[in-house]
Amino acid sequence: MVFRNGWNSTRAELGPVVKMEGIKSSLGPFFSLSEHRIRYPETVIRALGELYAEYNQAFGPLVEANREWETDYQFCRFPDGSPVNFGVQVDMVGLPQGFLEDASSMSVDEVREVLRRLVFEFENSLAMYQLLERTFSFAGEETFFRRNFRASLAELRERFGMPIALLAVTDEKYRAMRESEFGKVEGEPLSDAEVFELSGFDRFFGPDDFRRHLEENGGRCGFLLYARTSDPVAKLKKPDLQIEYPLLGDPKIRRVVKAHTLTMNVDAPDMEYGRRINDTKEQMHAIGMAFPIAHEEDFYSPAFAKHVAKGSAYTEFGGGPRLSVGMMEYLAFCGVDTARVEAGEVPLRCKPMKGTYGCYGHVSGVLPDRDFRSDLRSNLRKRGSYVVQPELASPEVWNETEGRGYNFIDRNFFSLTNGTVRFLGGFRSLMPLDSVEARNGRNHGSKFTVWAEIGP
């Protein structure tokens, strides 16, 4: 780990945990630290902004591979034609206070290269807008995130002269979003005014609504689209589950969606794997954040690949390195000793390259563990290519106020809507050490999570 000794486990007065009121969602209640705010120094914000720029640049080949029509992603471009993700979420290791203090006197280049090794992934389709906008509004005041997020949406409306609609591309996604992001049960109306107040968008389309909109307008779309294209949770858990794609399965409608979307995440249901872009982590290799593997032979050395294919014991291998040259080079770039990985001292985390978010499909463990290797083999067959990172341990903090310990990760948000990177703020996700989530190595937002605000 890049942090100094002592930074990974600290004690502090973080203040009381409070239950947030007024957030309309089926996923509540939500809890936060009302008196604790993490302040990022300018060097950290600028360094993350530079990584965001690299992420955008790395999207170029992915967009071209995904292209079906000339109008695809026409609104997702800089003036020079290069692709731009207008908003991103950066999931990363939580930054301890000691590091933040040191980072304030480091150069942006130095901080950027440290953070490069601490990012779990970028996500280019934000969700749970109400939670993001209202969690830290303790006295009804406008939050830092809401002010900057709404300003970013306003800039896009002004730039393109069109309103912006949320679009759920499956019926399952539409129902789930109505419940989790707007607090609506089936059959309960949701007006455009409510959509704007609770999310910042001008309308919320489900598949039937969007078809009706096109029919009423002669096939033309009157909105920019913020497309929510992730598969339903049931399919994330079972990738072989068959679901209906009423919009994206229709080439005429898919063409309209890809021509009006502000998010580069639209696949045809039958599109070949190499061209798919939804929930992708493929660009992470290009920016030095993960190593890609399509087959075990990409991960293991040729000799060890043959060894495990025969079912031979890990300890019986004596033919040199167990990992491929590419994997060893990536570990060296991360500052990780290959020998420690092979000895089982440094765990690895493997994530599906495409089609999932959160922890769905993740395989984590140590190389000597037969179950880890078996799970990876099975998932490569079921889910396609994976990306591999050294397991990034979450720092811990003991809240003296309540006498409870947490591990934590940071989730930071950026936009790029007027030619300038804007920091929207961030959320520190604190997971109680005595929770089942922490014991299972997960920190991805649950009923146990306590949130703390990150700002400049």
Image (cartoon, rainbow, N blue to C red):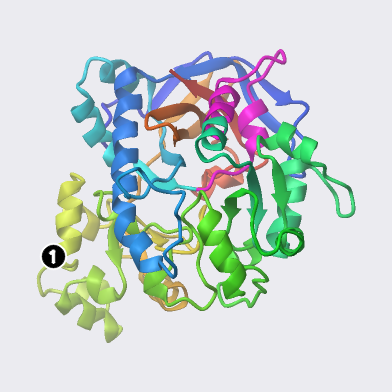
- Horizontal and vertical percent position of residue 41: 35, 18
Segment tinted magenta in the rendering: 125-153
- Residue matched to label 1: 325
- Horizontal and vertical percent position of residue 186: 86, 54
- Horizontal and vertical percent position of residue 5: 27, 26
Q: Is residue 111 left or right of residue 215?
A: left
Count the numbered circles shown: 1
Q: Is residue 393 left or right of residue 13?
A: left
Place residue 316 in its image quadrant. bottom left
- Residue 430 visible in the current orientation: no
Could you tell me which residue is drawn at 28 percent across and 16 percent down? 104
In this view, the residue farthest toward the front is 218
Residue 127 in magenta?
Answer: yes
Place residue 129 in its image quadrant. top right
How many residues crowd mark 1 within 10 Å: few (<14), some (14–19), many (20+)? some
Q: Nearer the viewer, residue 77 or 263?
A: 77
Q: Nearer the viewer, residue 149 or 121?
A: 149
In this view, the residue farthest toward the right is 187
Judge whether 212 appears above or below 188 on screen: below
Could you tell me which residue is drawn at 46 percent across and 55 percent down? 264
